[in-house]
Image: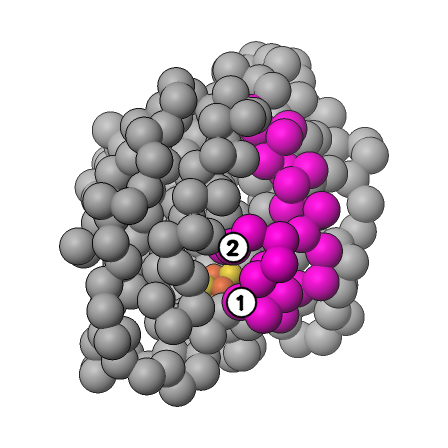
Amino acid sequence: MSNNATALQSYPPNIREAPNTRKTKEAVLPIYDLTPFTMLDFPDKCAAIIWFSGCNMRCPYCHNPEIVKGKGNTKIDDVLNFLEKRKSLLDGVVLSGGEASIYPGLPDFVRKVKEMGYAIKLDTNGTRPDLVKNFLEHGYLDYIALDYKAPPEKFKRITGFQKFETFLETLSILCKQNTVQFEIRTTVHTSLLNEQDITAIINDLSSKNYIGTYYVQNFQNNNDSPTLEILPPQERILDISQLPQPKGFSIEFRNF
Ligand code: SF4
């Protein structure tokens, strides 16, 4: 892997087009919104967050239905101009959404942002292993947050996405490299996931020699922020005392 400028000059040659590429207005205006400054989302970086519109999953607990189902309203060039002007104030860019990896123009966008000198964090649901592999090979990424939505038997119910194996491919690619720091995270609503499911995920991460931090996030009910599906209130909170000790990595619990 390379982080040098020479590598950045070449366009990634072997990225397949996103499986659900949309030749629509969204492809022209792929960005839903931009957060100009955050110190919370990219470890050790002052970053802007780019919210890409559209997603190839339909997680019931998603708090961003307007981004997932909505159309973009911002041109890529406008975002690039913004980033060019903020180079002296920001040092990172977070690619979030929605799911940034389904935007067909992402490789070109990432290359341009990287050439400006920014560190890049990708938030992803793991459905584009080819893209992640190529970005790693080109030194385009500095941090990755990967959602581990559910064990295989619940994956389709929770995401609406058929192929757990595609996610696993992304996970394996990341676990086999040690150049780019990454984190794994799972959101838990106990009507969807239970202690056995999280145990299965912990055991899977142990078997893949994961060495980072696994974040287990308790679903936050927020009446001001609708979810993709109407979910009942959680009747109970996940009993974290039932979870096994992970081997080789740490667990952090958020919002418990
Ligand atoms: S929570 Fe699920 S539906 Fe919402 S943006 Fe993430 S992957 Fe897409």
**Which residue corresponds to the image point at 25% horizontal and 48% vertical from the top-left?**
240
* Direction from residue 192 to residue 108 in the image, left or right: right
Point out the residue furthest to the left here. Answer: 256
Q: Is residue 234 left or right of residue 129?
A: left
Residue 111 seen in the figure: no
Label 1: how many Cα within 10 Å (few below 14, some 14–19, many 20+)? some
Q: Which one is in front, 92 or 76? A: 92
> Which quadrant of the view contains residue 71?
bottom right
Q: Say what amino acid the circle numbered 1 marks.
A: Ile
**Which disc is residue 158 wearing?**
1
- Give the CA distance from mark 2 to mark 1: 7 Å
Rendered location of residue 163, percent (x, y): 72, 56
Q: Position of residue 174 (x, y in %)?
A: 57, 28
Magenta range: 149-175
* Label 2 sits on residue: 150
Figure quadrant of residue 39: top left
The residue that appears at 46% across and 74% down in the rendered structure is: 60
In the image, 105 versus 181, the foreground residue is 181
Q: Residue 29 got which mark?
A: none
Q: Quadrant of the N terminus?
A: top right
**Residue visible at 54% across and 58% down?**
99
* Mark nearer the N terminus (2 vs 1): 2
